[in-house]
Amino acid sequence: MLDAVSAELLKFSRHRATWFLIWIYPVGFILLFAIAIAVALSGALPESPGTPSTAKWIENTAAVWYVPPHTLGRYLIAAFTAVVFAGEYGWNTWKLVVLHRRRPALIAAKYAMVLLLLYGAVLFTALLSVVLTWASDHLTGDAIPPGITPAAILHEHGMRAAVTIAPVLLTIAYTSLAAILTRSMIAAVVIAIVIGTAEQTFTAFAPLLSVYAPRLIWGLYQVLPGYHLENLGSWIVEGKAFEARFPRTGVVALGWATSAMAMAAWIGGLMLLTLGSFRRQDIN
Amino acid sequence: MESEGAVVELVDLSKTYRGRRGGVHAVRNVSISVGAGEVYGFLGPNGAGKSTTIRMLLGLIAPTGGEVRLFGEALRSNPRTLRRVGSLVDGGAFYPFLSGRRNLQVLARTHGGEGADARIDPLLEQVGLAHAAERRVKGYSTGMRQRLGVAAALLHDPDLVILDEPVNGLDAAGIQEMRMLIRNLCDEQGKTVFLSSHLLHEVQQVCDRVAIISRGEIVREATIAELLRQDEGLRIEASPLAMAQSALEGRWAVEPDGGAIRVAATQEEAPEVVRRLVGAGVDVFGLAPERRNLEEVFLSITQEDPDA
Ligand SMILES: Nc1ncnc2c1ncn2[C@@H]1O[C@H](COP(=O)(O)OP(=O)(O)OP(=O)(O)O)[C@@H](O)[C@H]1O
Ligand SMILES: [Mg+2]
């Protein structure tokens, strides 16, 4: 299996999509950071807002973790997943590799590779963020708030990283299924964007919509992944359930275990469907 | 060929592509068996079903009927046998954004077998691509891709090599090299080779045995020598032709041939043919042995389809 993952890495580390969709995290961060430093040094800002609190300082270094689970980040992940899974149809290369491995192993290797590259890039960016923030505070003469310990940094980053897991896996799962079924990168990206947007819109507007069909919306809201993603995030960051108030039917506030199981079912189900569809597929 | 030693065995293999306007019966009840160490040719005109059969052989598409057996095991229940197979289909499709060498490295790792990495350089040398190994495949010519495809097929030292139209797109020197390579795979390395072609003279030069496929069905399976022998014949000018035909039918195959008839008899049988004709009161004006060249044999075989 390690061989298969390493083959995928070898394949995609040279692809242009990897630059635009994966290395964009550290590259984008360095660019933004450089601009921020330049602005600070030029004195364009009236007054330094003063030393941030310890918590705020640490939170700022973890900003990159907010990208993958939210709209733009999920589009980036969807696009990369589409290239990785549907690209093989476009290049006509499935027939090159399917002799060498069982088909499920090829799909599993792709999942592993996408996660490895994505989390590698984000983790690297987070590390860069801590080091550069610390260094730039020295450079600009800003005071570093007291009480910053590796353990405190690790805790904040670990928490933020945990929040990304379910949405990232979900995005990869439905995009890979779309890629295998449509055999087209463009179609897979479009479907993934539609699904992602629909899911986020529904989650946001479900309480409003529920006045039209209270029971249906209430049921859907608790079955579809949107609420469970919010809820897991809330449990991880705030230690309590995410509460959604529905005018007719009441409040949705589920335990973390329920949401974790719901997400595991969604992600696992979609990935198994992807494996199953590919197993039986004719490669012409 | 007994099925014990068969490397490839197709049993009643069929494939129907479903479409909006009914299905296309691309392959119908194909049964053949290829022994170890053989170079087996799969010959047929465009659209005959060669690529479809090869894709089923490689597990790329699922048969709608019948079974593929490789090395004595059913492919369906044991897809791992494919690890002993090397293939070249569609003229070598590769990752266009990677160099030739990197493509082979990706394959070597995907396979995960021992020693594949070490074989990359010698293979690139062997197929004449060492000079272009670092260039992206995107910029390769058709022939270069085909050559890289051969290297990819041999990368993990397979026991069975399956080549779909291996000489397509190759220049004269490339075709010559390919022939030598294929014979060498079989004669020196003891590999079994299954190749398809729509060119009879290609198959004639490298294969031990051929199956001729036309409209999805095997119309003949024979060694090259047998094929030639089967098509020895006598051209006879006689009168009346209808009487001549009925005098010979039942003993030999007879077909009209312009103002004469063509009898599927050997030259040794000529005296008997003449005795029969004369006995039936037919006037014989001329008799000549006729050996059609293989191209004509192939054409006549693939065109004698009933619904042609
Ligand atoms: N994916 C497909 N969907 C529908 N029909 C197909 C498909 N692939 C092949 N066919 C049809 O099946 C038949 C056999 O095609 P196949 O590609 O196997 O022929 P071939 O012998 O390889 O021909 P060629 O010498 O042109 O490569 C043809 O009638 C073709 O149109
Ligand atoms: Mg073909």
Image (cartoon, rainbow, N blue to C red):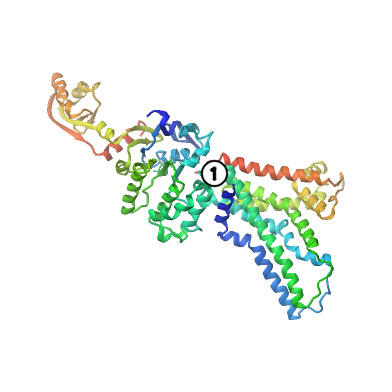
In percent of width and height, residue A53 lies at 84, 68
**Quadrant location, ligand no. 2:** top left
Q: Nearer the viewer, residue B111 or A253?
A: B111
Q: Which amino acid does label 1 sit on?
A: Arg
Question: As drawn, which residue projects farthest toward the bottom?
Answer: A43
Splitting the image into 4 quarters, where does residue A10 fall?
A: bottom right
Q: Quadrant of residue B2?
A: top left
Classify residue A216 as left or right of residue A74: right
Please indicate whether residue B292 sits to the left or right of residue A216 in the image: left
Relative image position of residue A212 (x, y in whole percent): 81, 45
Q: Measuring 82% from the left and 51% from the top, which residue is drawn there?
A: A235
Q: Callout 1 environment at 10 Å: few (<14), some (14 to 19), or many (20+)?
A: some
Q: What element carries label 1?
A: loop
Kindly identify the residue that appears in the image at 80 percent across and 43 percent down: A258
User: Which quarter of the picture shows residue B34?
Assistant: top left
Q: Nearer the viewer, residue A90 or A54?
A: A54
Q: Mark 1 points at which residue?
A: A101
